[in-house]
Amino acid sequence: MLTPRWRSCRPCSSTLATVPVVAVFVFMQRQFIEGIMAGALNASAFQPSNKETRNRMAIALGCSTITWRLTDHQASVEEALRDIADVGYAGAPAGFRDGERPEKVSELYRSFGLRPLASYLGAMYHDPAERAQILEQARRHIDWSLVLGVTELFVAESCFAERFGVAGHQTANRSDQLSDAGYQYLADALNEVGRLCREQGMRACFHNHTGSYIETRDEFDRLLALTDPELVFIGLDTGHLAYGGGDVPDFVATYASRIKIMHLKDVYRNVLEEARRQKWDYHTAQAHGLWAELGEGVVDFRAVFEQLGRVGYEGWAIVEIDRTTKPTPRDSIAACYAHLARLGLVSTN
């Protein structure tokens, strides 16, 4: 196993702070879900063209602000949220923010007609020495989320330089996997966080990420087999799974009932193939335009949503193009929305 130099996959994912919780702002979970179905699922609800699927699935569509933050495009949070709302999305992630009051964040998002969406807690879950700190972080993320009316929490293994360096080069049976003990520590920690979430009416959803110990399909399968499906759900990232060599529709077919929230992104086939041929590290691949808008890469999103419709998926799907090759982030998220509309998954009225 590697001796990693750790870095968080989300810059603010592990910051500790005391978050005030004001009871009046805490939404009952049933009310929140009903609000999604009645409100957020209006203009940006997925309505698949297949009648049987349409009758069984309701997906609220969100969009991440990461495209503005990672594409050398200087923009305020307000500009990003305005673009997201104008294109037609119903929500955007509102990650845990040290020193900020969640009530103010909620007010900002709702001023654009957007719902705050799931926070992201990246940590070294596989390391038992980190357990106490992780649980404390989880409690703070949960308190933050409850004020915002959010019902999911993304949880993910931290990324590190050694894995970023060889990301995507091997797509199964990697020699740098966690030890058996490491997998068990990881699963145990996730179960504990999942239990904390469940106690507050939330769901912990594991997020796969390139450059972490859970990148390839076999790594993801092994972790899911070790975790309690009633405590640890899936927050799938379609692009990271594809970059790690995974068949995204097949993964969704296997685990559809466990998926509760998603990040939607794609990868360009030519960049993916060149990255493997040249043995680029993750950051070099990203600089060469790895991330594709939906419908422009290798992921068959029609097949993905057909599998979700099979189990009556209800929840958020968040467009997240980390770095775009389009002229602007707005062009990127509009292209993604247009692709979903062409699939018959989004109302354009």
Image: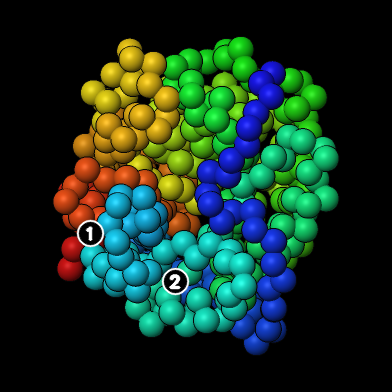
- Distance Cα–Cα, label 1 vs label 2: 19 Å
Circle 2 residue = 115
What amino acid type is highlighted by mark number 1?
Arg
Residue kind at label 2, given as amino acid type = Arg
Q: Is residue 301 left or right of residue 222?
A: left
Q: Mark 1 points at which residue?
A: 330
Q: Residue 298 carries which label?
A: none
Could you tell me which residue is drawn at 48 percent across and 15 percent down?
170
Which corner quadrant holds the N terminus?
top right
Q: Is residue 19 above or below residue 151?
A: below
Residue 143 horizontal side relative to residue 266, left or right: right
Q: Which residue is drawn at 18% across and 63% down?
A: 348
Q: Residues within 10 Å of mark 1 (few under 14, many from 20)?
A: many
Residue 179 visible in the picture: yes
Instruction: Give the structural element (helix, strand or loop) at label 2.
Output: strand
Percent x, y of residue 324 = 27, 45
**Residue at 71% across, 57% down:** 138
Q: In this view, does 96 lie above or below 166?
A: below
